[in-house]
Image: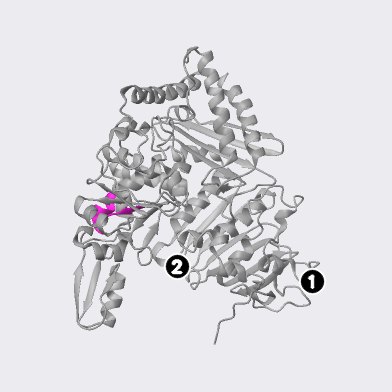
Amino acid sequence: MTKKTTYDASSITVLEGLEAVRKRPGMYIGSVTTKGLNHLVYEIVDNSVDEHLAGFCDKIWVTLEENGSATVSDNGRGIPVGMHKKGISAERLVFTTLHAGGKFDDSVYKTSGGLHGVGSSVVNALSEYLDIEVMREGKIFHDCYNRGIPAIELENGLLPVIGKTKDTGTKVTFLPDASIFEKTRFKEEEIKSRLHETAYLNPELTIYFQDKRPESAEKLEFHEPDGIIGFVKDMNSKKEVLHEPVYFSGTSEGIAVEIVFQYVNEFHENVLGFCNNIYNAEGGTHLTGFKTTFTNVMNTYARELNILKEKDPNFTGADIRNGITAVVSIKHPSPRFEGQTKTKLDNQDAAKAVGKVTGDEIIRYFDRNLETLKTVLSCAEKAAKIRKTEEKAKTNMLTKQKFSFDSNGKLVNCESRDVQKCEIFIVEGDSAGGSAKTARDRNFQAILPIRGKILNVEKASIDKVLANAEIKTMINAFGCGFSEGYGNDFDITKLRYHKIIIMADADVDGAHISTLLLTLFYRFMPELIYEGHVYIAMPPLYKAMPQKGQEEYLYDDKALAKYRKAHKNFTLQRYKGLGEMDAGQLWETTLDPASRRLKLVEIEDARLASNTTELLMGNEVPPRRQFIYKHAHDAELDI
């Protein structure tokens, strides 16, 4: 029987209601990993925060239940339950229809993070069940759904009443659907960090967090009356600060702007952007407005104070932001984000508003606080001197525009110049590098062997980082530069490989090498991670060879335990290193796109990522020891 090949009206599929969400969940929550799972909690919490911004809610309760579900409740007005013109309860419409909600009516919410209007309905679609109680008008209204489908019949189009109350608010309990998500256990550390972040951004809001799961049970209260000043103090709590936090705020063209910054005695720059309480991991126009205006104002001051002479070039933006920790938070009536997960703000008027407020307020502050101004400019001077020394000494290899080979000629490049197809493997050791060179597909796979463990950039000064041979080799190979202001500014559009794959042994040393590489990328080329270019190869731990049947590669101890249950007589080979595999095995298990396993490196929470990187890779030993004690049960031992 021949397959139907006609393309007519019957070929067009319409995904009704929330079916589209279940079909393509990544379009709505970013991914079906733990990151996407936690995002479900944030979507419901953000609805409660929007009630707070509207002036009707000052308490939010978030509970991770013992059975794996999550409950979010607030003391806001409660979702409207009356009859909508569509003929059903307004609550039912909100939870079953995409792009339905009060966020589109600016008389209800002046500012809101959930403008796409898909949050509640998406959480409903991706949950095994969702239960909701709405308290308003002296009654408790109830509704329930199974995988997005209503499980309760409406009474004359309205929700059934299950009790009376003097309180108002909304309570949502949902259990993520195990058939959608890779894992269904919420990651409490990320959720706590996000809730704490929300408390900093809303000083009059209190968030009560409770984890009822036995292995991680705890109760916490997040209330930060100091607001984003406390946020910056918290981020700099373990650093040598150079002055008190500088806070200013203002409104321009209907956009409220709030900014805090403080300098520390370190090279790193840490500027976080928020719009309507949503963290924008990839920044956006609000950060552009702040950085541009701040750079211009500081260069003007540098010339007025004769720090920059007439013939001197201006400080670069990177010079001026050397050592800064800043939070830029705006409230925008009509935010426009790139993507549902809101990682980048796109409104051009945000840049103008932030620039105007920064320009006015920062001048007013520095005119009255000359010592702080001199401290900030001294940081810029220090950064500029290092940059100029690099340029004069010609030690900055970054300016050499070589395509294929670094100074040692170690990079074995691929033949294709199509960036979307090309991938580069960073391989530790000559033996593994040799196997990889033989095994690869030379059309689109490049191999870059490195010797041993690279420099820990968290502990090193910028001149040592730039002088390190292995780091220079990688920068030359990637082709997109390094940081900003050191001879070859980072530009993601010049990246030569769509995938940068760390290929290290499956042991403690291999994990250490991967961690050192990730620290380098995170601190000096973070866009590589934020834009999804960095991966970790997952070579198998074992090869099982049964007396009868096909050989099988096993990637972890769970897979081995499962294999043991199904097979009795077999020989087991344990791979301690990539060098133990021949070219054929390496291609089959680690290089072949059709059969290999790769881990995509993602950052969900910038503050948590920065603090953890500093904790684990920095100079302070006692906090690291405490972290190891606390998380010892999470470790995967290589014995």
SS of the residue under disc 1: loop
Q: Which residue is mark 2?
A: 182
Extreme-bottom residue of the structure = 1
- Label whose residue precedes the other's in the sequence (2 or 1): 1
Q: Is residue 489 magenta?
A: no
Please say if 609 is above or below 219: above
Residue lying at 28% horizontally and 70% vertically, measured from the top left: 554
Residue 419 seen in render: yes
Q: Is residue 529 left or right of residue 552?
A: right
Depth check, front residue: 440 or 196: 440
Q: Position of residue 617 (x, y in %)?
A: 32, 44
Please name the amino acid that badge 1 sits on.
Gly
Residue lying at 33% horizontally and 43% vertically, measured from the top left: 404
Please name the amino acid that badge 2 sits on.
Glu
Q: Position of residue 338 (x, y in %)?
A: 59, 50
Please say if 461 is above or below 410: above
Q: Which residue is mark 1?
A: 87
Residue lying at 67% horizontally and 38% vertically, measured from the top left: 349
